[in-house]
Image (cartoon, rainbow, N blue to C red):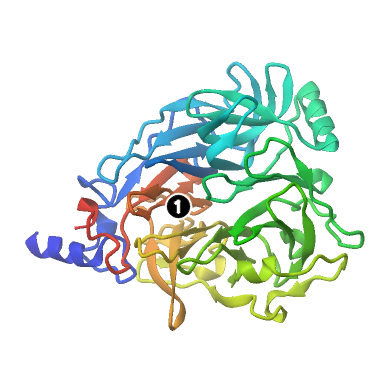
Amino acid sequence: MRACSLQLSLLGGLAFFASACSWSRFDDITKNSPVVLLEKPGSMNGGFGVSLSTASHEGQTELLVGGTVNVSGAALYEIGQEGAPGTTAIDTDYCSGHGSICSLSSLTAGFANASGPDRTRPLCFAVGSGAVTTKQGLVMRCQDFTEYTLSMPQVAQDQLAASIAQDQPRDFPMATDRSDDPVLLASLPEKHLAWFYPAKSTEFSELLVPSGVDVADPSFGQSLAVLNVEGGRVLALGVPGKSRVLLWKTDGSAASSYIGCLAGASGMGRALAGGAFRIDTGDDLVVSDDSHVQWIEGTTLFALPETSSSECVLSGTIPGALIDWFDCGSTQNVAECEKSEFGAALAVGDLDGNGDNEVIVGAPKMTVNGKESAGALLVYDVNTLGVTLVDTKFISSAEAGDELGRSIVTPHVGKRDIIAAGAPGHGKAALFYCSSLPSSYADSARCR
């Protein structure tokens, strides 16, 4: 066992170079294991792990795990320190319907600080749509149990009122950036409508789509990302049914400008994520299609001029925009890339604490140790050789049909980020602490 412990220390968990003595055999049964399964609340009967969002404030990090859209609620977990993450939910009343009307969204959003009707509160989440007391809108809930709603464009308000009256919930996907005072981006897919709330504001600003841009598709706004760049934000909205991503920019005010449309391979815009890949730079945009992932420079997008053109262009035709692209990879333990749904979810995080981020890609239909659709996470690093697959992650006790990687976020713990991923096929959510990246686990008892 001594030799095994040494090898585990060197590999640091579910490493790309998995061996017969890998953490993949022991990840969820060993003390201080590098993979921690969260306990599903008894009140959440459907789809636990469908959605994930996270927020951090003054060293405190929370994770919101959502269930089936419009049916279930969401549960809040205190991630705490690396040595003792909370595995039992500390609050299960997020969009639970207890005391207020609320329908869970497919994409929820976390705030380090959120402006409310009376004051700013830390660690809040935009969770869905409904009514708090008599006011209808997007539902916010904070760690202090405060709930309130944000008003929406009139078309969205009318749709929400009708859905409440008819008991036919509608989906309002949402996304934020990871700054201390984030911008909230929201959409109503069925009406091809999108809007945002500037930092420190509860007032919405509608995003205008130029006439001639074809967005008539149910997938409108089902993927969203907010990029925090010098000078403002880039707001990205996917329409994967049309294989495109719509872009706006805002300078921090309520004003916004449409700056273009990215086209690509089939499914372009299926998932979106933002994050800075180099130290001291603004966020970049990560976009998946049906088989690839693109890394696009955010500052270049922000520099694009306002346009009314209905044309959509390839990212590679914008000078300096496309940094790299990559596709699925297999290892000894994970296989079947061609049917893996590579890119179903994306996240960006600094897993080794060196200031540069890595890309985590969900492949929920991946075969793991012979179990079909158990799902896996593929971690890519950016180096002088380009984008390289450096790690694969899965659950050792995975079952066929788990579909790990349907949702991914990167909670901030200590000096780096960890990975949280949902496996809603069997109602699971897991935290992944270790990485094969150099020095990423030097101070972690979980990865020795």
Residue occupying image coordinates x 80% and y 26%: 161
Q: Residues within 10 Å of mark 1 (few under 14, many from 20)?
A: many
Left/right placement of residue 440 relative to residue 163 reads left
Left/right placement of residue 142 relative to residue 87 reads right
Estimate the x, y position of residue 255 in percent, counting from the top left.
77, 50
Q: Is residue 248 above or below residue 315?
A: above
Camera-nearest residue between 311 and 307:
307
Q: Is residue 414 above or below residue 380?
A: above
Q: Name which residue type carries label 1.
A: Thr
Q: Is residue 218 above or below residue 249?
A: above
Estimate the x, y position of residue 375 in percent, counting from the top left.
46, 56
Location of mark 1 (residue): 410
Camera-nearest residue between 204 and 380:
204
Residue occupying image coordinates x 72% and y 51%: 221
Residue occupying image coordinates x 48% and y 29%: 143
User: Which quadrant would residue 376 be assigned to in this image?
Assistant: bottom left
Quarter the C terminus occupies: bottom left
Is label 1 in a helix, a strand or a loop? loop
Q: Is residue 67 visible?
A: no
Q: Is residue 167 visible?
A: yes
User: Which quadrant would residue 85 be assigned to in this image?
Assistant: top left
Task: Give the residue at the far right of this rendering.
Answer: 211
Estimate the x, y position of residue 361 in percent, counting from the top left.
50, 62
Quarter the N terminus occupies: bottom left
Residue occupying image coordinates x 81% and y 37%: 153
